[in-house]
Each structure stands twice: as C-alpha cells, then as structure tokens.
Amino acid sequence: MSTPPIIVKKIKKITGGHHGGSWKIAYADFLAGMMTFFLLMWLITLMEPKQKASVAAYFKKFNIFQKAGVSMLMEYYRTGKVETHRIVQPLPHEIPPVKGEGERFKRILETRLKSLKEHVLIETLETQTKERVVKIEIVEFLNKPLFHSGSAELTSEAKEILKVLAEEIKNLPVTVSVQGHTDAIPSRRGKIGNWELSTARATSAMLELEKHGVPSEKILEVAGYADTSPLIKEDPTDPRNRRITLLLHFKPQPAPKESP
C-alpha cells in the first residue's frame, strides 16, 4: 500500500499594505506639526512689535536647561504677556540719546530718513541773544523735486521728510519759522512769480507739519523769499536753491539759581 504524498501549505502574511496603519501614524504626526506651526504663526500675528522683539531676544538667549520655549508660548497664550528681555540694539524707530539738538536731528536722518537724507541739511546757529536755533534745509535736486513743476503741491518724498520732522518737532519746546525759496529762473506760470510761488510752497510745508501734529501755536512765521537768499550763491539757478527752510527756535533755558 503506497503512502499518499504530504502537502505543506505556506501562507504568506502581508502586514500593512494599503490597509496597514503605519502611514496613518506618519500622516498624524505631519498634521500635528502643521497645526503647531499655524498656531505659532497666529500667536505671532497677535503680538505687538515690542513683544515680537522680546520673543526674538528670548530665543537668542535660549537655554534648554532653563525655561523651554513651549512654556513661554503657553504663558503668552494664558496671560497675553511675555517676559521682557533686554534688547542690546535699539529698534529702528528709536533714537539714541545725543548731545545737542542739531546732532539729534542728524541722527534722525540716519535712522528714519536714510533713503532721503541727501535732501536735508542741518546746521546749528548761534545768535547774539544766545537763542538756540536749528536750521533745517530741505533741498531739491535735479530730477528729484520737492514740489510738482511750477506748483505748490508737495511730492511724496517731501511729504515723507516733513512727516518725520513733524513727529519730532511737535514734542519739542520750540517755535518754527517756515521759509520758501526758489532759484533765479522766472516762474513759467504766467502772473504767478517766484515771490508768490515761494510763499505758497512755504504754506504747503506749514500745512503738512500741522497735519502731522505740530500745533499751530508753534508756527512763528510762514514766508516766501523767492530767489533773494540762494543756498548756492555762485549759481543762482542751481536746483538746490529751490528749498524749504525750517528754523527751530528753542526756548531759552532758565539760568540756574545760585545757592545762598
């Protein structure tokens, strides 16, 4: 009697495949990471610039053995506050303290009007009455005007310069003289001469200062001088003679009282 053959069946088990769960774990990790990222972006948009600077300073001094970044974000989420860290470098809109009013305005040019600083000349004047006066000349250049041709309408560059200066002047103990000047080329607008044009431009500059917060009580004078006081005396037709002059008259400081 013959023995029947023995048949061994081997079943190959396939784990995972398109019905497995390993890819789901990876996808869940991806979603969790994206949610954390967008939550972080949302929290940053709610912060003020000063708080953002504090956060940046925090991570510059971050130490894994001290306070973790997650706990800082959770603190902001719960309280709306972030622990402030000292920032070594000043923010762009902050002006470091300097000695002398003229030097302060020069520092403003370097920090807030860097792209337009060539249009502004600053000089500190000494008067016989010992009055402190800062002279600010806002000058034109060829193809870089302060006013539209033949009119008293300010260009966007001139408005930006006056805006920045006004934000500083409005908080200073000063009175302001606003002067308009033209070059020696006669005006091309018919009956409107350089006297009328320079006066109108000085008025436009004054109104722009008031628009940005300079009280009208601080305006001491608004006058046009046509081409009678050129900045470039050797060439009265030089475009730099077309300018606005601001004279800042600082109130004299009271003399210190002598001790008895």
Image (tube, rainbow, N blue to C red):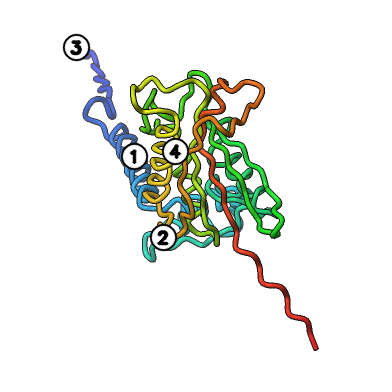
**In the image, residue 41 above or below residue 156:** below
Give 257 or 93, whichever is nearer the viewer. 257
In three-dimensional space, the C-alpha distance between marks 1 and 4, rounded to whole angstroms, equals: 41 Å
| Label annotation for residue 1 | 3
Q: Nearer the viewer, mark 2 or mark 4?
A: 4
In three-dimensional space, the C-alpha distance between marks 1 and 3, rounded to whole angstroms, equals: 73 Å
Of label 2 and label 3, which has the lower sequence position? 3
Q: Which residue is mark 1?
A: 34
Of label 1 and label 3, which has the lower sequence position? 3
In three-dimensional space, the C-alpha distance between marks 2 and 3, rounded to whole angstroms, equals: 88 Å
Q: Nearer the viewer, mark 1 or mark 4?
A: 4
Residue 155, by quadrant, is: top left
In three-dimensional space, the C-alpha distance between marks 2 and 4, rounded to whole angstroms, equals: 36 Å
> Outermost residue, bottom direction?
260
User: Which amino acid type is shown beneath numbered disc 2?
Assistant: Tyr
Q: Nearer the viewer, mark 2 or mark 3?
A: 2
| Location of residue 223 in the rendering, given as x and y in whole percent from the top left corner | 47, 43
Q: Secondary structure at mark 4?
A: helix
